[in-house]
């Protein structure tokens, strides 16, 4: 069953997509589809915190990709026979960069899209490819702006606070189950497996906390404090399971009592 924060977020995303489509329809802009694409992609993680992070990466990554495309297209204007070489180099770079983070992925995708447009329009006039770059920049910026304005001034921060609270409680519950699993089979292999599980379970919450200041500002201090405490408990458990497996049993019991007490509040 979906949580309250998730159900609310689904409704918010539906409104965001509808508004971006209306902006595309009413402007009657040829490249306005980038508004819709950007809004949908940024909002896709459902989590407000991850969406803000993704919006930042998409905006910055697009700008870097467009600037790099402008430089390469200027070079290709005078050296059109070098396009295959440039394509191979970008493909080689993409293999290393695209999987590193969303920001690098957007840089590579923007480069490929813009250079693909250039290739389809060669030979081109001095202005042709650069109008495409400007249109792409305007479309992405508008989509990101719609997301930020709606999130800040229409949706507010109430659901974001609830989302952070739900994620903190979920991670705390997973920590409790993992520690109980270790106590049931207190072996070195189990210790390392449980440490890996705990580290994996905290990834989303870490992203939430890292963007909490941008998303919530000074609001929801108690919830932000809870999230940081949960991360500290998880980090403590990982250190115990990895660094001190020979004396971990008694300390794990103490930590489990703290986790259980916090869940009961």
Image (cartoon, rainbow, N blue to C red):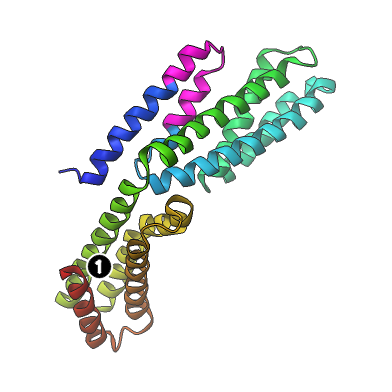
Is 250 situated left or right of 13 in this image?
Answer: left
**Percent coordinates x, y for residue 65 in the rendering:** 65, 35
| 233 is higher (above) or lower (below) than 24 | below
Total number of numbered discs in the rendering: 1
Prevalent SS, magenta region: helix
Residue 89 in picture, x, y percent from top left: 69, 36
Q: Is residue 247 visible?
A: yes
Residue beneath the point at 48% across and 52% down: 214
Examine the image and state in which quarter residue 6 appears: top left
Q: Is residue 165 left or right of residue 96?
A: left
Reply yes or no: does residue 24 show up in magenta: yes
* Quadrant position of the C terminus in the picture: bottom left
When the figure is inspected, residue 4 is found, relative to residue 197, above or below; the finding is above
Q: Position of residue 51 (x, y in %)?
A: 43, 42
Determine crowd level at label 1: few under 14, some 14-19, many 20+ residues with C-alpha closer than 10 A. Answer: many
Within the magenta stretch, is there residue 119?
Answer: no
Q: Residue at x 35, y 85 (%)?
A: 244
Magenta segment range? 21-40
Could you tell me which residue is drawn at 44 percent across and 23 percent down? 20
**Residue 238 horizontal/vertical position (percent):** 35, 73
Q: Is residue 71 left or right of residue 162?
A: right
The structure residue drawn at horizontal position 72% and vertical position 30%, both measured from the top left corner, is: 86
Whether residue 186 is visible, yes or no, is no
Q: Which residue is under mark 1?
A: 175
Which is more toward the observer, 24 or 68? 24
Q: Quadrant of residue 57?
A: top right
Q: Residue furthest right?
A: 78
Q: Nearer the viewer, residue 215 or 207?
A: 215
Q: Quadrant where the N terminus lies?
A: top left
Secondary structure under the numbered disc 1 in the rendered image: helix
């Amino acid at each position: 069953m979906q949580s309250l924060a998730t159900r609310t977020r689904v409704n918010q995303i539906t409104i965001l997509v509808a508004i971006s489509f209306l902006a595309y329809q009413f402007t009657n802009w040829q490249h306005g589809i980038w508004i819709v694409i950007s809004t949908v992609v940024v909002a896709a993680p459902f989590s407000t915190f991850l969406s803000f992070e993704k919006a930042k990466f998409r905006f910055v990554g697009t700008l870097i990709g467009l600037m790099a495309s402008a430089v390469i297209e200027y070079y290709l204007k005078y050296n059109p026979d070098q396009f295959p070489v440039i394509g191979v180099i970008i493909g080689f770079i993409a293999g290393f960069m695209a999987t590193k983070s969303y920001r690098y992925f957007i840089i590579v995708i923007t480069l490929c899209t813009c250079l693909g447009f250039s290739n389809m329009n060669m030979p081109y006039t001095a202005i042709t490819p650069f109008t495409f770059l400007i249109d792409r920049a305007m479309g992405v910026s508008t989509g990101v702006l719609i997301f930020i304005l709606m999130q800040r001034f229409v949706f507010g921060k109430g659901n974001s606070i609830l989302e952070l609270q739900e994620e903190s409680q979920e991670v705390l519950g997973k920590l409790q189950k993992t520690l109980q699993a270790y106590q049931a089979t207190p072996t070195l292999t189990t210790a390392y497996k449980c440490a890996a599980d705990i580290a994996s379970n905290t990834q989303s919450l870490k992203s939430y906390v890292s963007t909490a200041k941008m998303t919530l500002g000074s609001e929801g201090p108690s919830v932000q404090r809870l999230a940081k405490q949960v991360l500290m408990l998880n980090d403590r458990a990982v250190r115990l399971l990895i660094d001190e497996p020979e004396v971990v049993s008694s300390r794990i019991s103490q930590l489990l009592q703290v986790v259980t007490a916090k869940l009961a509040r």
